[in-house]
Image: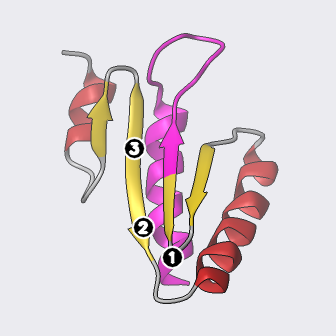
């Protein structure tokens, strides 16, 4: 297993799904999830690395992968950590 995947497995609540990191966040209100996605979007633009985002009412699922490399990279692990930090901010 690569070092990146080992790092990924240590992330709290993140699931390793092939070459993707995936986590679902649950919010009390729909607009709380929308606000979270907006903040995450600002981060993603700042580093020019963008997650997959799925919004299903009060559940927001985030996936990180590096499509250009067709594998999980350090950028994805950093993105996952940043996603958790956005939630805490």
Q: Residues within 10 Å of mark 3 (few under 14, many from 20)?
A: some
Residue labelled with disc 2: 25
> Which mark, residue 22?
3
Secondary structure at badge 2 equals strand
Magenta region: which residues?
A: 62-89
Q: Residues within 10 Å of mark 1 (few under 14, many from 20)?
A: some
Q: Residue visible at 71% across and 71% down?
A: 39
Asked where in the image residue 8 lies, by quadrant, the reply is top left
The answer to which of 87 and 26 lies nearer the viewer is 26
- Find out whether the residues at labels 1 and 2 contact each other: C-beta distance under 8 Å: yes
Q: Residues within 10 Å of mark 2 (few under 14, many from 20)?
A: some
The answer to which of 78 and 87 lies nearer the viewer is 87
Q: Residue visible at 43% across and 41% down?
A: 77
Q: Percent x, y for residue 67?
A: 62, 18
Q: Mark 1 and mark 3: span between their CA atoms?
A: 15 Å
Secondary structure at badge 1 equals helix
| Residue 64 is inside the magenta segment | yes
Quadrant the N terminus occupies: top left
Q: Residue visible at 67% across and 66% down?
A: 37
| Residue 73 is inside the magenta segment | yes
Earlier sequence position, callout 1 versus callout 2: 2
Residue labelled with disc 1: 87
Q: Percent x, y for residue 46?
A: 79, 53
Asked where in the image residue 25 lies, by quadrant, the reply is bottom left
């Amino acid at each position: 297993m690569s070092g990146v995947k080992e790092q990924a497995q240590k992330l709290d609540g993140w699931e390793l799904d092939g070459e993707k990191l995936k986590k679902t966040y649950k919010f009390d209100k729909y607009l709380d999830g929308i606000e979270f996605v907006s903040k995450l979007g600002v981060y993603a633009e700042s580093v020019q690395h963008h997650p997959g985002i799925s919004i299903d009412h009060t559940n927001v699922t985030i996936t990180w992968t590096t499509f250009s490399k067709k594998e999980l990279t350090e950028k994805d692990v950093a993105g996952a950590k940043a996603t958790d930090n956005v939630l805490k901010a």
